[in-house]
C-alpha cells in the first residue's frame, strides 16, 4: 500500500492529485522551483522540496533531482501529473530503479507511445517525408509532450524551414526533446478522444468519448463528455481503436487515445500515456475518481470486468490569464480574487493574492459543470463563469461565456476551426454603460457623511474611467439624502463600498464592486480609474515595438541589426513566456533604427524592444 506520494509536477494538477491523496489517507510531497516557492501546491502538501532555479529545464524537467527529492522526503510513490516528465520513459525507469512505485504505465509503453512518430508507426501510419506543394497545408508537431507546444500549421512551402526551427526550439524548452515531425493538416475536423484505463491483469476500460474541438494555438479550451452527435458505428470504432492501442503496448493505468474526426472517419493522432487536463469531465459522467483508480492499479488491484455506466453530460472550460483579443497574449500579475458559484467544480493551483508569473502555462483553473443533459450542463457552466469573480490580470472568461452560448457550440456543430472563424466577434469589448457610475458611487461611499454636499452643491463630481479601451465619465452629486446620479432616468437605491443598486427606467440592477489599485471590477466589467489630471508623459516614438508580456528574448531574426531594412509584418524577434514562443513583427516597412533586444535578455511588459522608422514614399510631382 502506498503511504506517501510525491507529485512530479506543479499547479492545479499537483493540487488535484493531493486532494485525492488526502481522501485516501496518503501523505503528500510537493516539488517546487524558486518561482513556485510560495505556490499553492507547495503550501498544501505535507512536505515540499526545493528544485533550485526558475525555468522548467532547471527544475521540473530534472528527473534526477525529483527522484532525489522523493527519496529525501520519504515518499514511496511518484505521480507524474501531466506535461513535463509525465511521458518520459527514462524518468519512469529512474523512479522504479530507486525502489519507488510509479503511478503510470510501464516505461516500455511510454516509449512506444510517447513519441508520436513511433506511435503512428505502431498504428500503421507513416509521417510525411519530403513535403511538396501538393501536401499543403501540413502540421509541424513535437514528437514528445503535448498541450499545443511545438506545433505549427504551415500553408506555404517557403515557411516550412522557419516553422520547423521554431517548433524544435519550443519543444526542447517545454519537454527537453526537440524532435518534431510533419503530418497532413486536416482542416475543420473535430478533435475527439477516448479515455482508457487498464490494470495489470489484462482488463482495459474505454471510458467514453470527449470532444475537445474548441482550441487555440492547438491547445484545448473547452472540453466535454460524451462527444455529442457521433454515430453509434463511429463511436464503436473509436472504442475499438483505443482499446487496440492500449493492448498493443500492454498498457497499465490511465491514458487517452486522440483522434481527428472528419468526413465521418476517425484519424488516429496519438496516445497520451498520462492523465489529461480534461479528465474531470469523464470523472463527472462516470462517477469515478481517475486519480484514485490510478493509485489502485499501481498497487496491483484489478478493475471490474465492466466499467461503470455513464450518466448525464459534463463540460469543462479552461480559464487562462491571457488576452484573446491580442493574439492570446499571456498576462501576469496578482490574482486578487478567484471564485465561482456553488455547484461547479473548480480545479486550480491559485488562490486569492497569488502571483501569476512568466515561467509556466497561463492556465488559472478549470471549471466543470455536470447535468442530466448537454444543454443543461452548458447553460450551467456559462452562467457560473459569467457570475464568477475573477479579479486581476486579463483573462479569457468573457470568451468562454460567449463560446458556450454561441449557436455553433450550442448546436454541437463546432470543429477545430471555431476560433479561426469567430474570434473577432467573440472578443468584441463588453461595455456596461452603468459600470462607471457604479464604480464612482462605490468610491465616493461614506464621503457624504462629512457634509460634502454643502461643497458647491450645484456642481456634479466627475470621475473618469477607461472601459474596453475607451474613456468614460461618471457624474454624481452629494445631496442631503445621500449620493445621487447626475443622469436622467437613473436613481441611486443603495450604495456601499462593495455594492451599488441603481434603478434604471424603473428596473433595479445590483452591481458588485471591487477595487484593486486603479483596477475596478464592476460585476464582469473591468475598469481602470484614470487620474483627475493626466500625466503629460512623452509618448513612445512611432514604430516602437514594446514587449506585450514579460518574458525572455530567445532569438533574433538572422542578420538583424540596427540600420537593417525591414518589411511590415516581417518577424524580428521571438519572446518566450509561459512556455510558448511569441513572434514580434515589424509594424511598418522601413529601417530598424533602435534594437534593445538580445538573446537571453529578460524583459518586462511594455519594455522597448526596437524602433522601426517608416520609409516615407514621396508622391511624384506633376509637371506644371
Image (tube, helix red, strand yellow):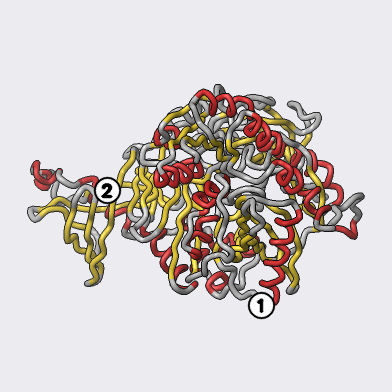
Q: CA distance from mark 1 to mark 2?
A: 61 Å
Query: Which quadrant holds residue 248?
Result: bottom right
Q: Earlier in the sequence, mark 1 or mark 2?
A: 1
Residue 393: in sight, yes or no? Answer: no
Marking on residue 231: 1
Mark nearest the camera among 1 and 2 is: 1
Query: Which quadrant holds residue 494?
Result: bottom left
Which secondary structure, mark 1?
loop
Q: Residue at x 68, y 27 (%)?
A: 595
Specify few, some or many for label 2: CA neighbours under 10 Å numbering under 14, 14-19, or 20 or more: some
Looking at the image, residue 427 lies above or below residue 607? below
Looking at the image, residue 243 lies above or below residue 218? below
Name the residue carrying label 2: 462
Residue 455: in sight, yes or no? Answer: yes
Judging depth in this view, the residue of 339 and 18 nearest the camera is 18
Looking at the image, residue 45 lies above or below residue 621? above
Marking on residue 120: none
Q: Is residue 129 left or right of residue 296?
A: right
Q: Residue at x 49, y 72 (%)?
A: 374
Q: Position of residue 488 (x, y in %)?
A: 24, 65
Judging depth in this view, the residue of 359 and 590 nearest the camera is 359
Amino acid at each position: 500500500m502506498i503511504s506517501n506520494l510525491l507529485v512530479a509536477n506543479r499547479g492545479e494538477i499537483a493540487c488535484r492529485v493531493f486532494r485525492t491523496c488526502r481522501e485516501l489517507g496518503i501523505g503528500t510531497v510537493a516539488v517546487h522551483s524558486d518561482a513556485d516557492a510560495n505556490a499553492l501546491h507547495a503550501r498544501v502538501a505535507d512536505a515540499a522540496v526545493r528544485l533550485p532555479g526558475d525555468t522548467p529545464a532547471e527544475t521540473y524537467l530534472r528527473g534526477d533531482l525529483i527522484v532525489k527529492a522523493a527519496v529525501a522526503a520519504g515518499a514511496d510513490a511518484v505521480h507524474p501529473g501531466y506535461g513535463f516528465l509525465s511521458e518520459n520513459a527514462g524518468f519512469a525507469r529512474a523512479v522504479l530503479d530507486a525502489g519507488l512505485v510509479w503511478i503510470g504505465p510501464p516505461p516500455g509503453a511510454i516509449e512506444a507511445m510517447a513519441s508520436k512518430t513511433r506511435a503512428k508507426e505502431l498504428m500503421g501510419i507513416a509521417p510525411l517525408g519530403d513535403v511538396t506543394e501538393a501536401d499543403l497545408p501540413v502540421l509541424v508537431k513535437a514528437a514528445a509532450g503535448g498541450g499545443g507546444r511545438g506545433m505549427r500549421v504551415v500553408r506555404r512551402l517557403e515557411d516550412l524551414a522557419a516553422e520547423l526551427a521554431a517548433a524544435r526550439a519550443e519543444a526542447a524548452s517545454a519537454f527537453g526533446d526537440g524532435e518534431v515531425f510533419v503530418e497532413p493538416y486536416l482542416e475543420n475536423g473535430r478533435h475527439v478522444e477516448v479515455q482508457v484505463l487498464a490494470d495489470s491483469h489484462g482488463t482495459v476500460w474505454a471510458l467514453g468519448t470527449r470532444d475537445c474541438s474548441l482550441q487555440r494555438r492547438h491547445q484545448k479550451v473547452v472540453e466535454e463528455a460524451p462527444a455529442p452527435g457521433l454515430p453509434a458505428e463511429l463511436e464503436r470504432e473509436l472504442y475499438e481503436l483505443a482499446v487496440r492501442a492500449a493492448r498493443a503496448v500492454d498498457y497499465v493505468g490511465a491514458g487517452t487515445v486522440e483522434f481527428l474526426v472528419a468526413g465521418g472517419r476517425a484519424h488516429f493522432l496519438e496516445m497520451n500515456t498520462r492523465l489529461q487536463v480534461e479528465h474531470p469531465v469523464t470523472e463527472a459522467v462516470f462517477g469515478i475518481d481517475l486519480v484514485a483508480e490510478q493509485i489502485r492499479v499501481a498497487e496491483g488491484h484489478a478493475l471490474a470486468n465492466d466499467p461503470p455506466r455513464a450518466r448525464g453530460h459534463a463540460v469543462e472550460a479552461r480559464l487562462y490569464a491571457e488576452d484573446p483579443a491580442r493574439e492570446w497574449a499571456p498576462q501576469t500579475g496578482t490574482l486578487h480574487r478567484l471564485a465561482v458559484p456553488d455547484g461547479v467544480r473548480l480545479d486550480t493551483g491559485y488562490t486569492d493574492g497569488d502571483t501569476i508569473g512568466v515561467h509556466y502555462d497561463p492556465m488559472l483553473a478549470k471549471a466543470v459543470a455536470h447535468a442530466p443533459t448537454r444543454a443543461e450542463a452548458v447553460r450551467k457552466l456559462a452562467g457560473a463563469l459569467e457570475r464568477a469573480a475573477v479579479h486581476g490580470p486579463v483573462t479569457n472568461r468573457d470568451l468562454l461565456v460567449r463560446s458556450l452560448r454561441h449557436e455553433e457550440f450550442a448546436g454541437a456543430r463546432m470543429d477545430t476551426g471555431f476560433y479561426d472563424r469567430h474570434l473577432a466577434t467573440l472578443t468584441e469589448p463588453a461595455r456596461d454603460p452603468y459600470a462607471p457610475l457604479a464604480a464612482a458611487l462605490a468610491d465616493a461611499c461614506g464621503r457624504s457623511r462629512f457634509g460634502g454636499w454643502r461643497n458647491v452643491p450645484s456642481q456634479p463630481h466627475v470621475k473618469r474611467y477607461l472601459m474596453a479601451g475607451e474613456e468614460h465619465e461618471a457624474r454624481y452629486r452629494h445631496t442631503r439624502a445621500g449620493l445621487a446620479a447626475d443622469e436622467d432616468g437613473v436613481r441611486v437605491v443603495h450604495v456601499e463600498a462593495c455594492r451599488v443598486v441603481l434603478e434604471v427606467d424603473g428596473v433595479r440592477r445590483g452591481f458588485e464592486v471591487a477595487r484593486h489599485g486603479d483596477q475596478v471590477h464592476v460585476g464582469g466589467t473591468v475598469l481602470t480609474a484614470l487620474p483627475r489630471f493626466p500625466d503629460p508623459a512623452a509618448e513612445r516614438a512611432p514604430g516602437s515595438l514594446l514587449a506585450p508580456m514579460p518574458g525572455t528574448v530567445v532569438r533574433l531574426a538572422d542578420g538583424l541589426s540596427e540600420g537593417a531594412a525591414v518589411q511590415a509584418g516581417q518577424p524580428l524577434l521571438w519572446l518566450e513566456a509561459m512556455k510558448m514562443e511569441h513572434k514580434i513583427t515589424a509594424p511598418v516597412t522601413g529601417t530598424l533604427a533602435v534594437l534593445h533586444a538580445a538573446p537571453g535578455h529578460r524583459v518586462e511588459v511594455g519594455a522597448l524592444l526596437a524602433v522601426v522608422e517608416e520609409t516615407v514614399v514621396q508622391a511624384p510631382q506633376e509637371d506644371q
